[in-house]
Image (cartoon, rainbow, N blue to C red):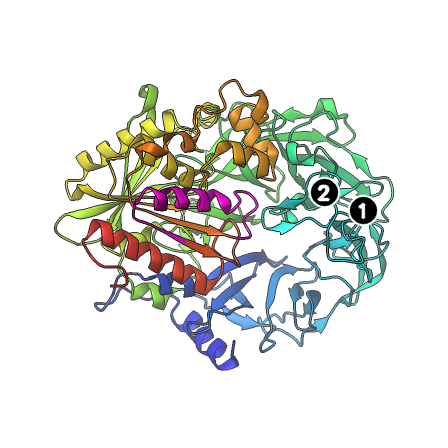
Amino acid sequence: MTKTFKTFTTALLVTGAFLPAIATAKPMTAEDLATLKRMGSVAVSPDEKWAAFDITETDPESYQRSTALYLLALDKANAMPVRIADQPEKSEHSPAFAADGSLYYLSDASGSEQLWHTDIATTGKSGTPTQSSDLKADIAGFKLSPTSEKIALWGDIARDCPTFGCEKSGNRAEPGPGTGREYDELFIRHWSSWETPGNYSRIFAFDLKDGKIAGEGAALDGDLVGDSPSKPFGGGEEIAWVPGEAGVFFTLRTADRNEPKSTNLDLYGAKADGTETVNYTDNNDATDTLPAFSSDGEWLAWAAMERPGYEADRLVVKLRKKGSEEDEAFALTKDWDRSVGSIVWTPDDKKLIVTAQDVLDHPAFAVDIETGKVTRLTGEGNVGTTIPLQDGSLIYTMNNLQLPTDLYRRAPDGTVTQLTNINGRELAAIDSVDIQRFNFAGANGDQVWGQIIKPAGVTGKLPMAFLVHGGPQGSFGNSWSTRWNPKVMAAQGYAVVTIDFHGSTGYGQKFTDSINLDWGGKPLEDLKLGYAAAVKIDSQIDGERSCALGGSYGGYMMNWIAGNWPGRFDCLVNHAGVFDLRAMALSTEELWFDQWDHGGTWWTRSDPEKWNPVNKITNWQTPTLFIHGELDFRIPYTQSIMPFTVSQEMDIPSKLLIFPDENHWVLKGKNSVQWYRTVFDWMAKWTKGGQEGE
């Protein structure tokens, strides 16, 4: 990415902060979606006068991405973010304020991901960036201690390496002299990469002096073998310094032959010198994660599941008093039928701020420590980072179906102020969409929720784009997505309909559990009833012209619909969907997911073929686009090659789009644009009578 481009977009970031809608607005395009700026990590200074955050920008020609740091004054109305720590052609991200108000962050300016540091003046001007570490391994993340005299760093390090990086990776699977890899236990691959046995995500604690790390550091994993933070999605939320800086608590997943079938993450504590590593949740064989200490160190809060092997079990907040035994911990939110996604303490230690999925939204909630009372703090939308302030305010990030992530402030009286609008100029030039929530009686008469998203102000009938979410324990809720984005789909002239079928999250654990052993049952009934309800509710939807789209479990449902609801849709779009449950059971990597949802190993299931799409292919007739990434090890890409072969052999119009450099998702900018163009062409061909490429 050129410096000219970065300077240009930075100007838009500042000057386009709060702009009204303009008369020349246009429908949103795939190119718009790929190039909108993306807010990442957020931190607030100790004096609460500044917020620092990183923004990822995408070049509209090359689609190369670069990340930069910005500073925003919190004590000034309508303040504009200002770029700091500017190192041309380099990426700076993951800011964290030290106790003295200076800023640490990660940067690739030295040629690898290392820790950097800059002073922040009272005026907000940043000093000259200085490199704080020069380690052999890339730093994946860091967590400062409360006084910033120590720091925890983590990255991929050989288990037999005593320091943060060695010359060799420790990969036991590569004995040489050839290129072959040898494995004697599972995992052999995970999500999008082949495993490197002997190499794990490991945490080291260092002293910090004068803005630089000191000494060799101390590994905190003791005799443990596993990943901390857990892979592939774990981060700083799984790590907490003990107040007083005596040590660190962290979430670790043990690496052994049982790992592909285990959801047993535990909380460990270790002294900062790497000694006395102890398992504090050994009694629970399910997930324990998200450790968070009260500021006085008297209480440890964390989130725990109850059922081993079930990754979508309810995460309940637990509290344990300092000096107490494990069995003396109590479940603070045991009577609240929601699963928490994050935990932070308020400065006065009287409440926890948590987030949780709740009927299409993902709000922030306050949980009273004394009573367990839960109070919703935010309205519609998807809340991410939460940072409570001394005056009772809450700084948080939020997005929704209309808008990507920005920074907000909730005052103690509940008044909400939007602090940033990082895509203000771009969004002002894009048409908005109309969004309607609805509910209906689904399978078993249970209440099921859905959404209708369509272009604002359009007249005439609109064909339907019927989106089915993945998971399956998930939600197509009120949130922004850089992958499956209902707004950009509606902008093509469709009424987008989403249904949170049985198995979705945000409606209580019983509703989430209800998809177990029933992948093709209640969910399909909900989708049929939801389709009919949407057409009845909104007369603008043309129920005779529709295309269904889904990824992962949603892709499974495309295959299931093809055989069990074959006459309903004009076309299907299947991204990384399961086609043959037997092949899936024997080739996917996280076995707990498949075995929990379907009742054990393939050969022990009571009726393994009941919900298998491969058994209904003689009913297939719907034109289908299949899409997959070759690096997808969750659902191997042969699961799309097989149904494409079936469709071709049966003379059903079909197309296969394979990405050699993508995994379970499409993440690269150019690939995203190609994905959407191919999908939109396919939908138009079958719902609008157009030709592909028009």
Q: In the rendering, at what x and y percent does residue 504 appear?
A: 43, 33
Q: In the rendering, at what x and y percent does residue 150 appear?
A: 78, 55
Where does label 1 land, which residue? 220
Vertical side of 366 occupied by 399: above or below: below
Viewer-closest of 140 and 22: 140
Vertical side of 378 occupied by 656: above or below: below
Q: In the rendering, at what x and y percent does residue 1 appear?
A: 52, 76
Q: In the rendering, at what x and y percent does residue 149 appear?
A: 78, 57
The amino acid at mark 1 is: Leu
* Residue neighbourhood size for the residue with mark 1, other residues' Cα within 10 Å, grouped as few (<14), some (14–19), many (≥20): many
Dot 1: element: loop
Where does label 2 land, which residue? 250
Question: Quick check: 111 left or right of 342?
Answer: right
Residue at the image point whose x is 67% and y is 57% from the top: 140
Residue at the image point whose x is 44% and y is 61% from the top: 671
Are the residues tagged 2 and 1 within 8 Å (C-beta)? yes
Residue 653 is inside the magenta segment: yes
Dot 2: element: strand
